Amino acid sequence: MKLWHLLPLAAVLGLMVLLGLGLQLDPRVVPSPLIGKPMPDFSLPTLEGRPALLSAHDLRGRPLLVNFWASWCAGCKVEHPFLMELSRSVEIVGFNYKDAPSAAKDWLAQGGNPYRVSALDALGQAGLDWGVYGVPETFVLDSGGVIVYKQIGPMTPEAWQTIKGLLQ
């Protein structure tokens, strides 16, 4: 028997091993290359108009949460009551992602505003720079503006148990 007859068998076995390894991964965990690095630089208008622009410089100096959200986002509706609760004790900055400002303002007027300020990321460029796959996503920044954690999906009490110790 020639060795080249064994090549298809070796290829199938290799694919089975890769599939087996892939099935053991948690699909909710998407590693971010930005963990441990300074937040991306940005300068965006704000939803509230005060201040007129929000920049990376404005987010340094204290630990906080940065939440990418949109009025059209189903997961954002799920996390919103919990963000309202958190905002009583934690500073949260919002990035309104690919949304109409009027829809975002209406949504916050109806459900309450947990954000100290919300930047308007109408084209999604800041989201791309931050590595956002889809909203909602929440980042934990340390006082130096370094990203220390990324939560993909709605903020929940379970997720908060992991995050709260990072805001020291």
Image: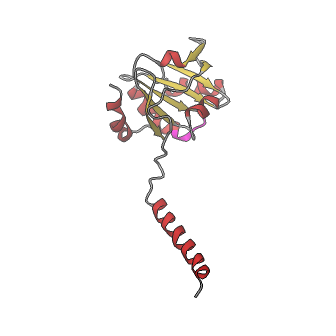
> Vertical placement of 108 versus 49: above or below?
below
> Vertical placement of 38 versus 1: above or below?
above
> Which secondary structure class fits the magenta region best?
loop
Q: Position of residue 94 (x, y in %)?
A: 52, 25
State the residue lying farthest toward the top. Answer: 51
Task: State the residue in front, 49 or 21.
Answer: 21
- Quadrant of residue 95 within the rendered picture: top right
Q: Position of residue 22 (x, y in %)?
A: 49, 59
Tell me: 17 left or right of 96.
left
- Quadrant of residue 84 within the rendered picture: top left
Tell me: 36 left or right of 101.
left
Q: Position of residue 19 (x, y in %)?
A: 51, 64
Q: Position of residue 162 (x, y in %)?
A: 34, 38
Tell me: 167 left or right of 21.
left
Tell me: 103 left or right of 166.
right
Residue 100 is a magenta residue: no
Q: Quadrant of the C terminus?
A: top left
Examine the rendering and report whether any part of residue 78 can be seen: yes
Examine the rendering and report whether any part of residue 154 can be seen: no
State the residue lying farthest toward the front. Answer: 2
Magenta residues (range): 71-75
Q: Quadrant of the N terminus?
A: bottom right
- Quadrant of residue 25 within the rendered picture: bottom left
